[in-house]
Amino acid sequence: MHVFELTKALIDIPSVTPEEDAIGLYLYNHLTRLAAKYTGVAGRIEVEPARHNVFAAFGTPVVTLSTHMDTVPPFIPSREDAEFIWGRGACDTKGIIASMLTVAEQLLEAGTTNFGLLFVVGEERNSAGACHAAEHHHLYPQGSRFIINGEPTSNQLALGSKGALRYEVIARGKMAHSAYPELGDSAINKLLDTLQALRQIELPVDAILGPGTLNIGTIHGGRAPNVIPDEARAELFIRLVNDSASTRAAFEAACANRPGIELNQVLEIPAIHMTAVAGLKTTVVAYTTDIPAFGRKWGQPLLCGPGTIHVAHTLDERVPKQELLEAVEIYKNLVRQLQTS
């Protein structure tokens, strides 16, 4: 199947997290056929009920091609025009999967082995599949010294990706009739004051990754317009560019000695620095990936893929057809180059 047709076929299989079972079976069947034809091995590893990572190995893998199977909602079926393939997952990451499968077949037809493929669940939520593949590495084929992780980078090799630090801020107060505010204690006012203090924190700047950023993603609170609110909360997302210690200390200090304020850390993913490869253009990405979750258990990471993150997670998600063709050649050349490094 041509890479364009394969991309559309994959897009048309809904795989919104955590419902990856159907696409996992499709990929397992595809890889099983390749394994039978070219003396490889294919398998499924359960991460959670009805959620499986899918892998294949041909020889002893020196390089593993990997990306995630899940998408964000909502499901959007495929369509195409002269320039793009559209639909949910077109660039994040169904087009990437199609490119990797195409590369595998072309390498095997040319007699190249000693590589693997790994497709994981859950990247869009908590990297459950990548964490499982790292923690249970012994269940998979061994030997990989490099892992090429696929995410939309416009086919440029990422020199680094920002990390993530998520917090929930909870404010507690006392309800009262809004005509008598002195009888209550507004949790929303406490939350707003705390958020303003957090916004004043100067985040670190990295020479390659650039500045850290803070996003106040959600705010919830209150019961009615005429009631002094007794509870409010906000969710924060910080893009890390270096070790998190100074940022965590600053946020904890800003929330300390504020009665009724609670700061809870939800998630931390470290920032990652990667290396260049001769002949490939480079970039830096602000988003996080599965790479930190793999924890080097699958080898030295590289990050590259067709499409731009700027249209991922949108209703206009699409991938340029030309970039899909280019990705096939880039991945193929990377595998061969890394196998001899």
Image (spheres, rainbow, N blue to C red):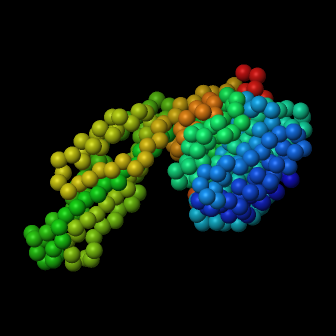
Q: In this view, does 225 lie to the left or right of 112?
A: left
Identity of the residue drawn at 63% across and 30% down? 299
* Figure check: 22 above or below 147: below
* Figure check: 322 above or below 300: below
Identity of the residue drawn at 47% across and 41% down? 269
Number of labels in the image equals 0
For this rendering, which residue is in front, 321 or 5? 5
For this rendering, which residue is in front, 6 or 142? 142
Q: Can residue 332 be seen in this view?
A: no
Identity of the residue drawn at 56% across and 43% down? 131
Q: In which quarter of the image is residue 35?
A: top right
Horizontal and vertical percent for residue 320?
72, 51
Q: Quadrant of residue 136?
A: top right
For this rendering, which residue is in front, 40 or 216? 40
The quarter of the picture where the C terminus appears is top right
Identity of the residue drawn at 71% across and 49% down? 44
Horizontal and vertical percent for residue 134?
59, 39
Q: In this view, does 168 lie to the left or right of 276?
A: left
* Figure check: 334 above or below 86: above
Among all residues in the image, which is located at the extreme top? 341
Horizontal and vertical percent for residue 245?
35, 34
Horizontal and vertical percent for residue 215?
40, 51
Q: Is residue 207 visible?
A: yes
Q: In this view, does 177 lie to the left or right of 95?
A: left
Q: In this view, does 178 lie to the left or right of 284?
A: left
